[in-house]
Image (cartoon, helix red, strand yellow):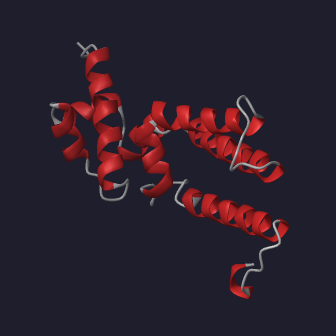
Amino acid sequence: MAQVLKEEVERRIREAALAEFASAGFDAARVGDIARRAGISVGNIYHYFPGKTALFDAVVPGKLARRLRELLEERVRVGAMQDATRPAEGSEWGVAAEATVSFALEHRHATIILLGRAHGTPYAGLAEDIVAMLTAAAVSLAERAGRHLPEPLR
């Protein structure tokens, strides 16, 4: 008779995987370390997920990565259109900032993974893309403010 999969065990596996991926990064994370964090055997993980990549995809789904990117792009877009140093209460920039912070707090482990520990996954370049976007926005704001930037920064 097949073993009945228990929601509690799967929840522990997911939480342990997020913590391990956030701590060690995807490449360095080992299924054995995830099992230890979850308090189960390695073999038990494979009853729920066929491998480390499938587990990663379950705990850091593509829609989550896309949403983080969308929120950051919106915050940069809105910030580039107004004075973000003194946002008015309820301003579009303040709303965008609040949404980004709320998302990052709600999905803190996944955000850490996506912004620095996703090497070996389809999201490995996300942090660099975000840095490039932020750099371009900062350069644009500086130039609009009349600040001269050295050539390598443009």
Query: What percent of the width, then of the height, locates residue 91?
Result: 75, 33
Q: Residue at x 69, y 60 (%)?
A: 133
Q: Residue at x 68, y 50 (%)?
A: 85
Query: What percent of the width, then of the height, locates residue 79?
Result: 75, 49
**Which sits in the foreground, 146 or 98?**
146
Residue 5 seen in this snapshot: no
**Which sits in the foreground, 69 or 16?**
69
Residue 32 seen in this snapshot: yes
Q: Residue at x 45, y 60 (%)?
A: 119
**Which sits in the foreground, 86 or 42?**
86
Image quarter (top left, top right, bottom left or bottom right) of the N terminus: top left
Residue 12 against residue 25 in the figure, above or below: above
Q: Residue at x 30, y 54 (%)?
A: 24
Residue 67 against residue 115 in the figure, above or below: above
Count every numbered label the image shows and give the total: 0
Q: Is residue 41 left or right of residue 147?
A: left
